[in-house]
Amino acid sequence: MSRGTVIDLCYLVAAVSFILALKGLSSPKRARAGNLLAAAGMAVAIGVTFAQPHLDHVGLIVIAMVIGTAVGVPAARLVKMTAMPQMVAAFNGVGGGAAAVVSITEFIGSDPKQVATYKVLEVVFGVLVGALSFAGSALAFVKLQELITTRPVVYPAQQMINAAVGVASLGIVLAILITSSTALIWVLLALALILGVIFVLPIGGADVPVLISLLNSFTGLAVAASGFTLNSNVLVVAGTLVGASGMLLTRMMSTAMGRSLPNILFSAFGSVVTASGATESADGRSVRAGTAEDVGTLLAYSRKVVIIPGYGLAVAQAQHTAKELADALLARGVDVFYAIHPVAGRMPGHMNVLLAEANVPYEELKEMDDANPELATADVALVVGANDTVNPSARNTPGSPIYGMPIINADSAENIVFLKRSMRPGFAGIDNELLYDPKTTMLFGDAKDTLKKLVAAVNKA
């Protein structure tokens, strides 16, 4: 068997492992195994690449790998769960940028006049989409890190400027296809970076999870394009998998929010803010605040309690304490489960990962469609750090920016308990009518501290 055949077979094994890993990632039960399988497949692909004949610049490749490992391993190990979405955005952007750089170097390293038109098309596609993903992901990171406002950034003639940059980019693409000009590649790179920034600026914070998924899809497509440029089948397969799965996930998240993708991307959603940090609304409505002791007694003598986690749970690192409370209630014979909204937190599956970290049994996690019918028979809906995903305005207020988004029906429960730091709005930046419901009791403070008090109160009841 020739060396080339062995290399191709190893690449085939790696590609199959990527497909099986993606299937494993579709379930929390198999997600860890799927992740390890993907890592093993990538290790095989990288190792076999060094066996390629006539591989140049091996020293530089090794240096780059050492630098990447020195940055990536500590980042992955030390990142807090609250910052995981930012890390995903950053790493995704690096992938898109790498694909763009590969496409450029392959183009300028050959005689442009001798390159087939379809090869030039692969290059310009990789540059355009990869650079757009890089710039967009970088700005998404900045928004998630709250280094700039999470609200949509709008300015005069924004749509006209965006359209002008988009048309100019397409014009440069056509010019490159006709002339194979190396200089125009750099112009296209600059326009793609600008396009990535202006594409993300008007997207509000509540839509960033969808944005990350879409940019992830863009990166996959750019990687697939660079795979065609390099004649690498494994890159084509890996990039196509990422691109297709990212696009499907984007569509699923859009559906979960009850909105179309164009509406999410171009409506400047989240620009309306009507609540403040006070304990009453702008029109003077007040809320009912309670004590941990009273709520603990209510929980202890309930039949069914539904815990609805949100980003505030992640911020407080309260997932372990939430499990302690659930265990204390289960020990008293209370039926307890967690209701998970598809877009809770700041990235897909954020709440599932958090609760899995706390060793919450998968059977206790129920997706929104399964949880909603049971909320009508629940004694208590315990909302821990969630806001927009339980806001009745999505059902009842046609003028609301989130109108039409499916929500967890916390208001169907007999009692509602909110754990919040203050009356500040959620990531969408709008008031939550559920806070003023007569059935709602507010427990203000850090979620982790409040949950500890509730555990103590339940044990004493």
Image: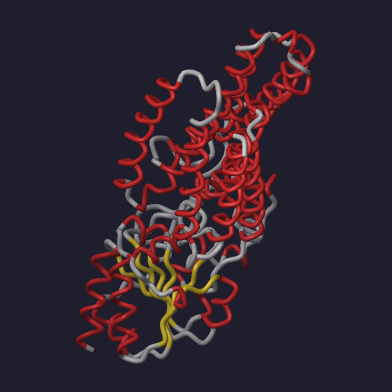
**Residue 84 place in picture, x, y as percent:** 40, 48
Q: Is residue 378 visible?
A: yes
Please say if 229 is above or below 112. below
Q: Is residue 331 left or right of residue 213?
A: left
Residue 99 as seen in the image, left or right of residue 82: right
Q: Quick one: quadrant of the N terminus?
A: top right
Q: Quadrant of the C terminus?
A: bottom left
Which colour assignment does the render follow? secondary structure
Relative to residue 235, is residue 429 depicted above or below?
A: below
Q: Position of residue 405 (x, y in %)?
A: 62, 61
Give the total of numbered labels.
Answer: 0
What x and y, as percent, mark residue 211? 57, 44
Q: Residue furthest front?
A: 1
Residue 156 appears left or right of 341: right
From the top left corner, tell me how far across and down residue 79 is, in percent.
33, 46
Location of residue 115 (image quadrant): top right
Please tell me which residue is depicted at 53% across the width and 65% down the height of the picture. Answer: 27
Q: Quadrant of residue 359?
A: bottom left
Task: Give the side of residue 275 with respect to residue 154, left or right.
Answer: left
Which residue is located at x 67 percent, y 23 percent? Answer: 123
Q: Is residue 223 visible?
A: no
Q: Residue at x 45, y 54 (%)?
A: 36
In front of the other: 70 or 364: 70
- Within the image, what quadrant is residue 298 found in? bottom left
Nearer-the-camera pick, 27 or 257? 27
Residue situated in front as seen by the camera: 237 or 412: 237
